[in-house]
């Protein structure tokens, strides 16, 4: 197996700057100079992006920046011992021992296990003391190789005294200093015997923090005589805890930065949950908190599926302000609505393709009077014969029925986001009332919010035990539907209908400069946050109008075309700039993302540009907005219409004036790509870490 570390990858007693970015860039250069990575910039960008999510400093003057990167060709470990310490975010102060773990995207399990083993060794004080005493890079390599082979470092560490600061840091983290007496274990026992804990540790990369937190928690528990067993959900594999061990545990600790896999296994147990780094920094405190939670009736517990899920979510939502709650509810409604719209819109487009645009006036009659064995004799002139006309009618009707769920689904799942499952039925009913009254998607939003709020308040009532089982399935849906829909009929519906009618008439009458201005606004919104709330508002506005579109009112189709075209610009522009026009101006990782962005952009998936925006938002987003605005304006100026709400160029058959639509996209794409390249060259790049921190 290839060596993880060589003397060439070690730097001793150097001053590498004052910021973590300086140290990481230097070590990325060491890996690249050793021929183990293809470029410094790509490796640095990936490593610093990981550092920006969670600081990698750990107690004892140590930092372990790490990442997976497409730039890495050989799993590698670079090490620097600093003459001037640098703050990597550890609670006990800056670090002087820096280990940089660089793993390829496709690193094999054996290498990942070795890297994880090394990370665990770094919490052993004799090992870190030996590292500080080493005088040559070769000694460092031998120490690391010994740690990976489970050889003790005592032969080097015997003559070394652990610095007082490091010992103090270790004690504050829940470890005893060398030679210190073990802590008493009296607090770890109760009337029923010794306490037992289980824990899960996990971090996004799964190489270092996952395993260091596990060992830290185990060591802290052993200090006070508590049995603690840990499940590490890391990159080198995970061995689930024995169900019998979980069942016998008195409490559970989650030291994680990602979702716990199989969380339901711990249902009902008191839980202490925190980021994985706290498991390294304060393992002793977490163990003590878990012990205290065992006998605390108010302690938070891992929820069971069902009612306790709702309680956990409500606890998490208490910190949200009203704007965040509204945004989350609206985005939930939109996300559940889109499949109805996407499927329905494409089916209607296929119906027009086979049966002609006039199929709308023939569909109901054909389906009532004809079938495959009795094809129609009267059908639109543009239909592909009797069979095409009949199949067109079938597809059109299925699509129209699917689109009919647009407003009810929007309202239903807005209510669901607020009140969980008891809100779905009242929300759907309020949405159906909105559709019946002609209040459109505005009515759906109001009805969904109203139904969700009422259902949520009803769910908080303290009712008799015999009535609790009926609340979510009978009482709440009944009363919330009655109140929300009743208010829509009696009070709210008429004003919303008037507003919707005025909005539709205004949009239908837009021509010339007014239509172009609308295209500019929609283009800016689509490119502002690349799939975020503003993007979704513009998209929802477009798809909500499709139900009112017709041959005589093509404005909604034109708005849909402009929105889809503008949303395709950012990923296509990123692909053009990074893979064709200026390869050297982008990292290897960005060039790889650029290759994928071609297909994502062509498919109308704006999120394909997010990796670029995350790394360089101050250049990517403005450039994207300029190109998107131009594309939206051109699409509206050309009066291009799209009967499909999604699909990009792959729904060409559903787009009128397809070549003009493609021209609009190409113009915006080229503008964004050129502007981005210009910004990268002329807008001075002060430091990469400043931009990454902004992301």
Image (cartoon, helix red, strand yellow):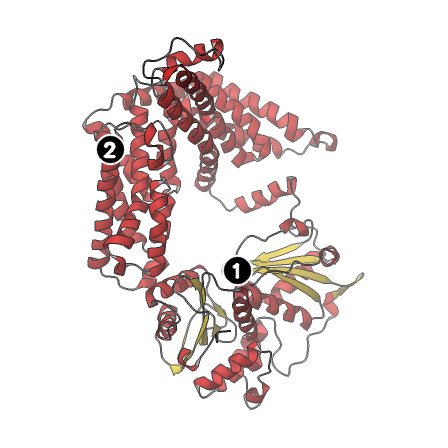
Please indicate whether residue 528 sits to the left or right of residue 517 in the image. Answer: right
Residue situated in front as seen by the camera: 533 or 365? 365
Image quarter (top left, top right, bottom left or bottom right) of the C terminus = bottom left
State the image quarter where residue 375 is shown.
top left
Q: Residue at x 54, y 34 (%)?
A: 416
Please state the horizontal and vertical placement of residue 449, each as a whole percent of the image.
49, 30
Please indicate whether residue 388 sits to the left or right of residue 214 in the image. Answer: left
Is 317 placed above or below 515 here? below
Location of mark 2 (residue)? 659
Q: Of tags 1 and 2, which is closer to the observer?
A: 2
Please state the horizontal and vertical placement of residue 166, each as a whole percent of the image.
52, 79
Q: Residue at x 55, y 46 (%)?
A: 316
Residue 530 shows up from this direction: no
State the image quarter where residue 123 is shown.
bottom right
Residue situated in front as seen by the camera: 692 or 591? 591
Confirm or deny contact between disc 1 and disc 2 (CB under 8 A): no
Q: Which mark is residue 203?
A: 1
State the image quarter where residue 524 is shown.
top left
Sequence order check: which comes first, mark 1 or mark 2? 1
Q: Badge 1, how many Cα within 10 Å: few under 14, some, many 20+?
A: many
Please state the horizontal and vertical placement of residue 544, each as a whole percent of the image.
39, 27
Q: Badge 2, how many Cα within 10 Å: few under 14, some, many 20+?
A: few
Please state the horizontal and vertical placement of residue 73, each as a whole percent of the image.
41, 67
């Amino acid at each position: 197996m290839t060596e993880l570390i060589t003397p060439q990858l070690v730097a001793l007693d150097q001053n590498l700057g004052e910021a973590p970015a300086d140290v990481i860039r230097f070590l990325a250069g060491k890996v690249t100079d050793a021929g183990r990575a293809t470029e410094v910039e790509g490796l640095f960008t990936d490593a610093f992006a990981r550092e920006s999510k969670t600081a990698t400093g750990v107690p004892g003057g140590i930092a372990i920046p790490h990442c997976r990167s497409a730039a890495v060709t050989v799993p590698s470990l670079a090490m620097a011992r600093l003459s001037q310490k640098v703050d990597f975010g550890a609670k006990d102060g800056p670090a002087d021992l820096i280990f940089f773990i660089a793993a390829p995207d496709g690193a094999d399990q054996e290498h990942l296990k070795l890297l994880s083993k090394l990370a665990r060794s770094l919490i052993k004080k004799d090992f870190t003391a030996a590292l500080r005493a080493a005088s040559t890079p070769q000694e460092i390599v031998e120490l690391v190789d010994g740690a990976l082979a489970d050889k003790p470092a005592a032969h080097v560490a015997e003559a070394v005294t652990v610095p007082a600061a490091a010992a103090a840091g270790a004690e504050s983290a829940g470890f005893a200093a060398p030679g210190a007496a073990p802590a008493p274990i009296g607090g770890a026992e109760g009337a029923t015997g010794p306490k037992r804990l289980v824990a899960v540790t996990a971090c996004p990369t799964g190489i270092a923090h996952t395993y260091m937190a596990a060992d830290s928690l185990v060591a802290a528990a052993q200090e006070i005589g508590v049995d603690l067993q840990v499940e590490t959900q890391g990159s080198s594999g995970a061995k689930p805890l024995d169900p019998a061990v979980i069942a016998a545990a008195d409490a559970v600790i989650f030291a994680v930065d990602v979702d716990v896999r199989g969380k339901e296994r711990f249902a009902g147990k008191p839980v202490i949950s925190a980021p994985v780094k706290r498991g390294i920094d304060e393992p002793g405190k977490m163990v003590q908190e878990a012990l205290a939670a065992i006998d605390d009736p108010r302690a938070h517990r891992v929820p069971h599926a069902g009612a306790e899920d709702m309680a956990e979510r409500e606890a998490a939502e208490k910190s949200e302000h009203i704007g965040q709650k509204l945004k989350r509810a609206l985005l939930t409604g939109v996300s559940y609505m889109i499949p109805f719209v996407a499927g329905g819109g494409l089916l209607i487009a296929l119906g027009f393709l086979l049966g002609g645009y006039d199929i709308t006036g023939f569909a109901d009659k054909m389906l009532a009077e004809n079938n495959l064995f009795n094809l129609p004799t009267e059908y639109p002139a543009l239909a592909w014969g009797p069979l095409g006309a009949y199949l067109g009618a079938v597809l059109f009707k299925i699509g129209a029925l699917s689109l009919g769920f647009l407003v009810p689904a929007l309202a239903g799942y807005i209510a669901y986001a607020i009140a969980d499952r008891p809100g779905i039925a009242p929300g759907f009913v309020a949405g159906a009332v909105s559709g019946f009254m002609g209040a459109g998607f505005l009515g759906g939003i109001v009805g969904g919010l109203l139904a969700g709020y009422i259902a949520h308040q009803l769910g908080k009532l303290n009712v008799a035990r015999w009535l609790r089982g009926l609340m979510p399935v009978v009482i709440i849906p009944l009363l919330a539907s009655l109140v929300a829909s009743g208010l829509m009929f009696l009070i709210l519906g008429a004003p919303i209908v008037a507003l919707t009618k005025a909005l539709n008439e205004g949009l239908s009458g837009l021509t010339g400069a007014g239509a172009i201005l609308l295209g500019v606004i929609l283009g800016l919104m689509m490119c502002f946050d690349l799939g975020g709330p503003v993007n979704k508002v513009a998209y929802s506005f477009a798809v909500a109008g499709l139900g009112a579109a017709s041959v005589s009112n093509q404005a909604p189709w034109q708005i849909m075309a402009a929105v889809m075209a503008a949303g395709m610009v950012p990923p296509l522009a990123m692909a053009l700039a990074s893979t064709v026009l200026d390869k050297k101006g982008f990292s290897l990782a960005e060039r790889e993302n650029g290759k994928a962005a071609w297909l994502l952009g062509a498919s109308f998936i704006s999120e394909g540009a997010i990796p670029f925006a995350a790394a360089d938002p101050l250049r990517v987003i403005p450039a994207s907005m300029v190109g998107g605005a131009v594309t939206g304006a051109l699409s509206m100026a050309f009066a291009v219409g799209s009967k499909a709400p999604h699909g990009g160029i792959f729904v060409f058959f559903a787009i009128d004036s397809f070549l003009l639509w493609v021209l609009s996209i190409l113009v915006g794409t080229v503008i964004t790509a050129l502007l981005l390249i210009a910004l990268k060259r002329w807008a001075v790049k002060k430091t990469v870490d400043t931009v990454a921190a902004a992301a």
